[in-house]
Image (cartoon, rainbow, N blue to C red):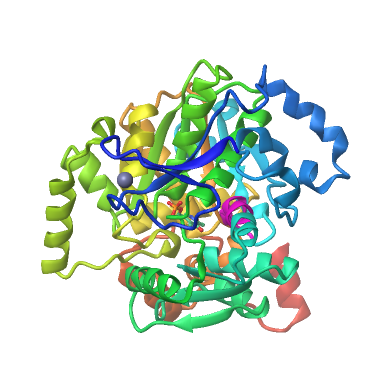
Amino acid sequence: MSAYQCCINPDCGKTFGVDEVLHCCPACGELLDVQYDWNAVKPLKSLNVFESYWSERSNPHRFSGVWRFHQLLPFLPLEKCVTIGEGQTVLQNAQRVAPYAGIKPDRFFLQYEGLNPSGSFKDNGMCAAFSHGAFVGASRAACASTGNTSASLAIYSACTNLMQSVIFIGSGKIAYGKLSQALDYGAKTIQIDGDFDDAMSRVQQVSKELGIYLVNSVNPFRLEGQKAIMFRVLEALRWQVPDWIAVPGGNLGNSSSFGKAFIELHQLGLIKKVPCLAVINAAGADTLYRLYEKEGLRWNGGRYDKNLTKKFYETMNSEGRKASTIASAIEINRPVNLSKCLRALDFCNGVVREVSEQEILDAKAQVGASGLGCEPASAASVAGVKKLAAEGIIAKDESVVCILTGHQLKDPNATVAYHGTDKDFYEEILGKRGVKTRVFANHPVSVANDLEQIVSMLR
Ligand SMILES: *Cc1c(COP(=O)(O)O)cnc(C)c1O
Ligand SMILES: [Zn+2]
């Protein structure tokens, strides 16, 4: 077959078949990529061909917002690709949010990935990883999750019955919207006494020991599916490449995957221009920001400074620093895709910023008021663009696409604490995290159960 797995370390470069199940390169420990012999795949003349597939929507693989682009991620034959209707998402020209972000209204866009079956972008990657797991004959799949990966795995498992799902979560750090999905969809749910980073290292050990298929974003097939988010953004812009893509950074799977999408589209001659990539950390989980912007860590052709990262993590351990942010989906201090993200930042002329809890919550309220609500992590992208525009790094008239990674209903606590009038709840959820003001709050009004009083209030 024309697809294979390949170590991203240029001094190693070992290759493996797509039928092998590996979490990293067995020779050197680096991450693996899925690569293709593009000459053996039927060459694409232009991206326009994908529009001709719209008329074939009764075919589930054409309906899928991921497999519709199978020619750009052909690691399995199409008939082996699992779909539950993922990727029916929209690019909204968010005129009402644009002034807040500091961008010209007709140039500012939100890519709303909350519309996926499980309510987050994770389905784009899960359909790909799940297909691969089923293809290699696994009967169980597992992940560690801050919530959305588990919801996504659970829904694929429930809908297809091809693999059972096992999820590992940290204690007390999962938004109820997400936990409720995993439980409802019947996933075997294991709560570890620790945080996400602890759950992540455990699930890797357990999967290895029991031969359970791992679908965390160290899984290179997942990142192939996530490329489709960029394909749909380009499609919605009629194949015009925007000036900027902004995305929240957690485990850095999305940013890595977007970078790979643009590297490949460019290499295939399907795009001329490459967008700039802005990856936005929460200030309470800012490993990438510190390493990239403060320490100057760079991809360096794949020979990035491993001593720098080693020292960074040693200091983090000795100081006992744990990730902490209301944006639970990006509450991650040891991003597993760091090296691939460096490659993406290198190719896409990237910048990294960190945003405060206050900035995240205010941006989230602005996104909500425009009609497409999102969860806190997603709003980091908008808060980050606002910051970059204020710094003059993004020009007002450049075109900007923010990825809204997850649905508003995933984390209702944050929303209700921001808008609500219950002081204790506000303090518990937001106040103690340093969110001091709520300038965009839409406070509910209390009134006696009395017709006259209600009417006079609304008059
Ligand atoms: C997983 C997730 C993220 C983080 O994405 P990475 O690819 O891990 O960087 C951000 N937002 C939401 C809603 C998520 O579910
Ligand atoms: Zn290697």
Q: What residue is shown at x 36% (from left), y 49% (from top)?
A: 31
- 128 drawn magenta: yes
State the residue in front, 346 or 420. Answer: 346
Specify the quarter for ligand 2: top left
State the residue in front, 54 or 428. Answer: 54
Left or right: residue 177 compared with residue 206 = right
Left or right: residue 53 compared with residue 376 = right
Residue range highlighted in magenta: 119-129
Asked if one can make out residue 382 in the rendered structure from this viewpoint, the answer is no
State the residue in front, 313 or 162. Answer: 162
Q: Examine the rendered structure and indicate whether residue 298 appears above or below residue 204.
A: above
Whole-percent x and y of residue 61? Answer: 77, 45
Q: In the rendered image, which quarter is residue 335 located in?
A: bottom left
Q: Examine the rendered structure and indicate whether residue 434 appears above or below residue 370.
A: below
Quarter of the C terminus within the rendering: bottom right
Q: Examine the rendered structure and indicate whether residue 423 appears above or below residue 215.
A: below
- 264 drawn magenta: no
Whole-percent x and y of residue 379? Answer: 48, 51
Asked if one can make out residue 360 in the rendered structure from this viewpoint, the answer is yes
Q: What residue is shown at x 76% (from left), y 48% (from top)?
A: 79
State the residue in front, 267 or 394. Answer: 267
Q: What residue is shown at x 11% (from left), y 68% (from top)?
A: 318
Count of residue discs: 0
